[in-house]
Image (cartoon, rainbow, N blue to C red):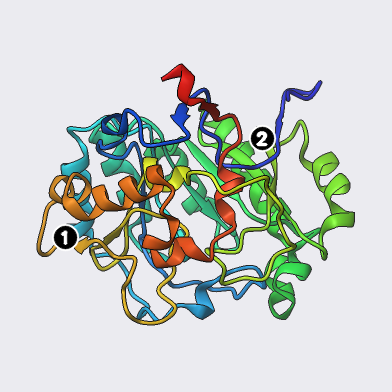
């Protein structure tokens, strides 16, 4: 909905607009295409350890994507219709020393909407100005001083000036005569923040461009979440629309996949061996999509235990067999 002051308030699901998907195996070929939502992970390193974050459960080594690899990824994406490019996954993007260069290169290469999520604790005037001038389209700030202690109590001092950093970014944007990046202030709905949500929305409504109340995700069953009780299991939109490139060139089809067992079960391939087109249009991703559309959710290990698919069906219209 749109607030009287102009800020958009959303329930915080991924949403898929008016996309229509079948309940069964019909017209399967329409989903076997190059993904339109791409995640690139500049780093899986982070300066925080938030209670709802799955990083500590990952067995993957911490690292930073070389800029040469990033350029190669963007060059391979440039010929495709990418609706959204997100430069984050499980780490803090502002830790990467070339994050501004990454945004600039992506925009110069024709990426329509470039965004990332950040805890904003590292944001300063130079970074803020650089991000504004790079062409970044939107920035999701995942916490503020009113909720930070609940997320990451051992780092409370880092958040003392967080509100002012975000306000300064918005001020600089106006001073430079720019409309982007749009700022989305986000709070995650969980037991420890439930009573803070109204104050959070009131604090940022009309100040930020968007205020999001996001459901707590389990990251494919790795984080304990309140029991969700959908009427029945349905298709996961992530596998149908997403492509993910991790910092070391590993590629998967699911932004919530965390390699917690060290077996890389959710990795399709690595860019050292294949191109993005070969990976995303190849047999392994095809098998994942076919399994989803047929309802064989146990085929993909992390799908079997995942309750998060239900949070990604906002706005999706499911077609009955009679309509196909």
Q: Quadrant of residue 75?
A: top left
Mark 2 or mark 1, which is nearer the start of the sequence? 2
Q: Quadrant of residue 202?
A: top right
What element does badge 2 sit on? strand
Left or right, 286 with reference to 314: left
**Foreground residue among 27 and 192:** 27
What element does badge 1 sit on? loop
The residue that appears at 68% across and 48% down in the rendered structure is 230
Q: Residues within 10 Å of mark 2 (few under 14, many from 20)?
A: many
User: Residue 149, image x and y in percent?
Assistant: 77, 70
**Looking at the figure, which quarter contains the N terminus?**
top right
Left or right, 6 with reference to 291: right
User: Residue 49, image x and y in percent?
Assistant: 60, 76
Q: Which residue is tagged 1?
A: 271
The residue that appears at 76% across and 31% down in the rendered structure is 206
**Foreground residue among 195 and 93:** 195
Q: Which residue is tagged 2?
A: 210
| Vertical placement of residue 174 versus 204, above or below | above
User: Residue 42, image x and y in percent?
Assistant: 35, 60
| Vertical placement of residue 8 versus 128, above or below | above
Q: Residues within 10 Å of mark 1 (few under 14, many from 20)?
A: some
The residue that appears at 48% across and 52% down in the rendered structure is 126
**Foreground residue among 318 and 215:** 318
Q: Quadrant of residue 95?
A: bottom left
């Amino acid at each position: 909905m749109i607030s009287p002051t102009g800020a958009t308030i959303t329930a915080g699901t991924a949403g898929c607009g008016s996309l229509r998907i079948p309940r069964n195996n019909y017209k399967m070929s329409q989903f076997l295409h190059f993904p339109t939502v791409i995640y690139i992970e500049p780093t899986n390193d982070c300066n925080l350890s938030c209670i709802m974050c799955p990083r500590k459960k990952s067995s993957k080594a911490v690292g930073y994507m070389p800029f040469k690899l990033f350029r190669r990824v963007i060059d391979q994406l440039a010929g495709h219709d990418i609706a959204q490019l997100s430069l984050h996954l499980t780490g803090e993007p502002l830790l990467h020393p070339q994050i501004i260069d990454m945004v600039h290169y992506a925009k110069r290469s024709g990426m329509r909407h470039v965004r990332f999520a950040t805890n904003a604790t590292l944001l300063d005037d130079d970074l803020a100005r650089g991000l504004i001038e790079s062409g970044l389209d939107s920035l999701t700030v995942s916490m503020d001083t009113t909720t930070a202690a609940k997320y990451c109590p051992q780092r409370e001092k880092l958040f003392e000036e967080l509100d002012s950093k975000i306000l300064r970014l918005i001020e600089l944007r106006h001073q430079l005569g720019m409309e982007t990046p749009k700022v989305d202030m986000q709070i995650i709905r969980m037991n420890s923040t439930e009573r803070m949500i109204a104050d959070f929305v009131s604090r940022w409504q009309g100040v930020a461009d968007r205020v999001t109340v996001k459901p707590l995700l389990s990251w494919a069953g790795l984080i304990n979440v309140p029991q969700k009780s959908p009427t029945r299991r349905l298709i996961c939109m992530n596998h149908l629309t997403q492509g993910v490139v991790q910092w070391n060139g590993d590629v998967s089809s699911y932004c919530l996949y965390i390699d917690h067992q060290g077996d890389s079960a959710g990795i399709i391939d690595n860019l050292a061996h294949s191109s993005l087109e070969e990976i995303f249009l190849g047999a392994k991703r095809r098998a994942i999509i076919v399994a989803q559309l047929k309802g064989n959710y146990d085929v993909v290990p992390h799908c079997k235990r995942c309750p998060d698919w239900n949070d990604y069906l906002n706005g999706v219209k499911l077609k009955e067999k009679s309509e196909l």
